[in-house]
Image (cartoon, rainbow, N blue to C red):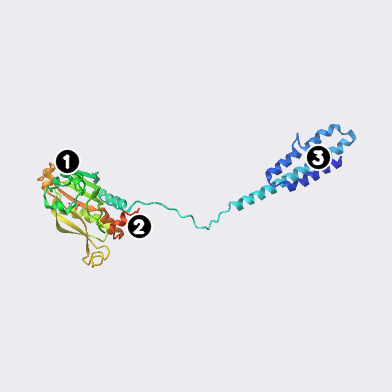
Amino acid sequence: MNDRLSGIKQEILDGIDQLHNSKAAYEFRKQFMDNKTGKIGQLMKEMKNIAPEERANFGKGVNELKEWALQYFDELDAKMKAKEMEMRYESEKIDVTMPAAEEQTGNLHPITQTRNQIIDIFAGMGFEVFENKEIENDYYNFTALNTPKDHPARDMQDTFYLSPEYLLATQTSAAQIHAMETKELPIKILCPGKVFRSDDDATHSPMFHQMEGLVVDKKITLCDLKGMLDVFVKKIYGESTTTRLRPSYFPFTEPSVEVDVSCFECGGKGCKLCKGTGWIEILGGGIVNKKVLENCGIDSDKYSGLAFGIGIERTAMLKYGINNIKLLFESDLRVLEQVKDN
Ligand code: DAH
């Protein structure tokens, strides 16, 4: 009988060579320890067939084997699980000193960033955004803006005509007329939009963006225009900049002004950017021509207005030091990635 017990013990000890993981060890353990089917469990059942005088001895031997096997399998299980855990740690090891994978984030196009900044600045002064149209008719783009047919000022802008009547908007100024026709007074609007002209060189593109500003109220003067534009240039080009108004001509404003910003590169001393003058031309504006107010049915004795038109590409080019307008339309990521204001 003792041979049988030591045979089982040897079988358990020999089994170790085939046990490659804790799951195999568990299955192997079952072959011996399972109460019903296990080899040691079976021995217990045989107790009744043993001669009574040997029974006590046999029972003791089986119990000892059972206890030994229990301890043996528990230790084996613990050892294997520890080894498996170690292997898992090894295979999932992370080197926390490795540089993190570079994350690429997109950013808004420089023109969009500039447009948003301009809107933010004027929204802060109470302006609301008014939608612009890309296709206009002759009346809104020219005639109502005091530029009737054969007016020499039509030559200032090379127009793309779609038909004798319809054209691609050459200026966001057309939105002034739509706003004055549809909105209650007083009006304070900002109108971003695409405009089109047959013009193409380093600083001009056949399609570009403008931002029209219009204020119509009682007692609006050029001082209001200068005050607002001073706020605008300080926020866009720097706190130390200021504006200068020069006389100019636009059919829809009287008086008309060309607005310069003091050179933010040299502080006004004169440099390459400002061509030695200390000033950089940035936009056109003026007091809304009475004829334009009247074209829209507004009493020009009671109300006056100011208007201005900002070139968005020009603003972006000056602000970010871009010297060719084409760079804004080529979608070259090396250029676009450099303009990240927000
Ligand atoms: N529409 C003009 C242009 O495209 C810009 C402009 C000048 C707009 C004077 C205005 C203004 O509102 O008052 O050249």
Q: Report the amino acid beneath label 2.
A: Val
Indicate the secondary structure of the residue bearing disc 1.
helix
Q: Classify mark 2 as within 8 Å of ligand 1 or not, answering yes or no.
A: no
Relative to 205, residue 2 above or below: above
Nearer the observer: mark 1 or 2; the answer is: 2
In the image, taking residue 216 as reference, residue 35 lies left or right, namely: right
Return the residue at label 1: 181
Disc 3: CA contacts within 10 A as few (<14), some (14-19) or many (>=20): some
At 78% from the left and 47% from the top, the residue drawn is: 14
Q: Report the amino acid beneath label 3.
A: Asn
Q: Quadrant of the N terminus?
A: top right
Label number found at residue 297: none
Label 1 vs 2, first from the N-terminus: 1
Q: Report the amino acid beneath label 1.
A: Glu
Disc 2: CA contacts within 10 A as few (<14), some (14-19) or many (>=20): few
Q: Classify mark 1 as within 8 Å of ligand 1 or not, answering yes or no.
A: no
Place residue 294 in its image quadrant: top left
Whole-percent x, y for residue 119 in the image: 27, 49
Indicate the secondary structure of the residue bearing disc 3.
helix
Nearer the observer: mark 2 or 3; the answer is: 2
Whole-percent x, y for residue 309 in the image: 21, 52
At 83% from the left and 43% from the top, the residue drawn is: 7
Return the residue at label 2: 335
Indicate the secondary structure of the residue bearing disc 2.
helix
Return the residue at label 3: 63
Question: What is the CA distance from the residue labelled 2 to the residue labelled 3?
Answer: 83 Å
Which one is in front, 159 or 223? 159
Label 2 vs 3, first from the N-terminus: 3
Which one is in front, 218 or 310? 310
Which one is in front, 24 or 206? 206
